[in-house]
Amino acid sequence: IGKTWAACALIRMARGQGLRVEAVKPVVSDFDEANWAESDPGRLLTALGRHHAPAMLEAISPWRFRAPLAPPMAARLEGRSLDIDEIAAYCRDRIARTGADLVVVEGVGGVMSPLTETATGLDLTAALGAPSVLVGGSYLGAISHTLTALEVMRARRASSSTSTSCCSSPIPCIRPEKAMAPPVAIIVFDGMQSRRWAAPPTMSRSIIVTCA
């Protein structure tokens, strides 16, 4: 859908405003340790203006798995496991220790994607308690998926300050503000035509990027 693209755009926007920015993508699967320049962590490091050094990779994504599967399945194949409390604690520590003005935390998959054997991406979002940027698509059914994700987040009191629609076709994106209560800011990005992206109207010291 464009979750990593949105995270990188937010990082570049903040850096362009003179802010000090850090990023965390705590868990990543489908990761090749020998060729990761274009991986999600690699793209985040590029957006931060950092070298692709092993130490920087470890800091941004400490849980990395080879298989292109949901993290708990990929971890199981390697004889490893994931713990939501440990992941949330790592993210909180990174946010607390960094001197950055903004820390962008990119989640794994969608709001309800499995993060561990017993927890989803929503559990991490709720545990961190930071505002979220919810990234949606322009495919058939995307409005329903995005609104459903927003409702699930509201039910868990996980705040979403902005919904970003990443379009991949010349057909204009639909802006479903009237279906949302309370209102959520909508940012429409035409991926075929533009590389510009606008920031959320309000900024927290940390923000979570997830998708429907």
Image (cartoon, rainbow, N blue to C red):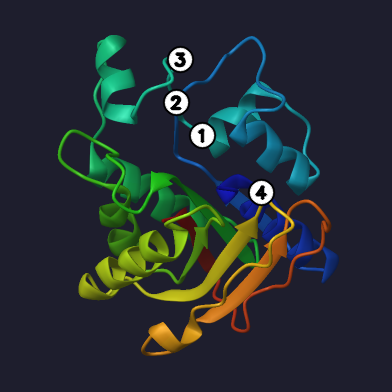
- Which callout, 2 or 1, points at the residue further toward the start of the chain? 2
Label located before the other in sequence (4 or 2): 4
What type is the residue that disc 4 sits on? Trp
Mark 4 or mark 1: name the one nearer the start of the chain.
Answer: 4
Q: How far is disc 2 from disc 1 in space, using C-alphas?
A: 10 Å
Tag 1: residue type? Answer: Ser
Tell me the CA gap for discs 4 and 2.
17 Å
Does 169 sit left or right of 74 as displayed? right
Numbered label attached to residue 29:
2
Residue 144 drawn above or below residue 89: below
Q: Which quadrant is the C terminus positioned in?
A: bottom left
Residue 18 figure quarter: bottom right
The label number, if any, that marks residue 61 in the structure image: 1
- Left or right, 48 with reference to 62: right
Q: Amino acid at mark 3?
A: Arg
Q: Residue at x 27, y 39 (%)?
A: 114
Q: Which residue is mark 4?
A: 5
Say what secondary structure mark 3 lies in. loop
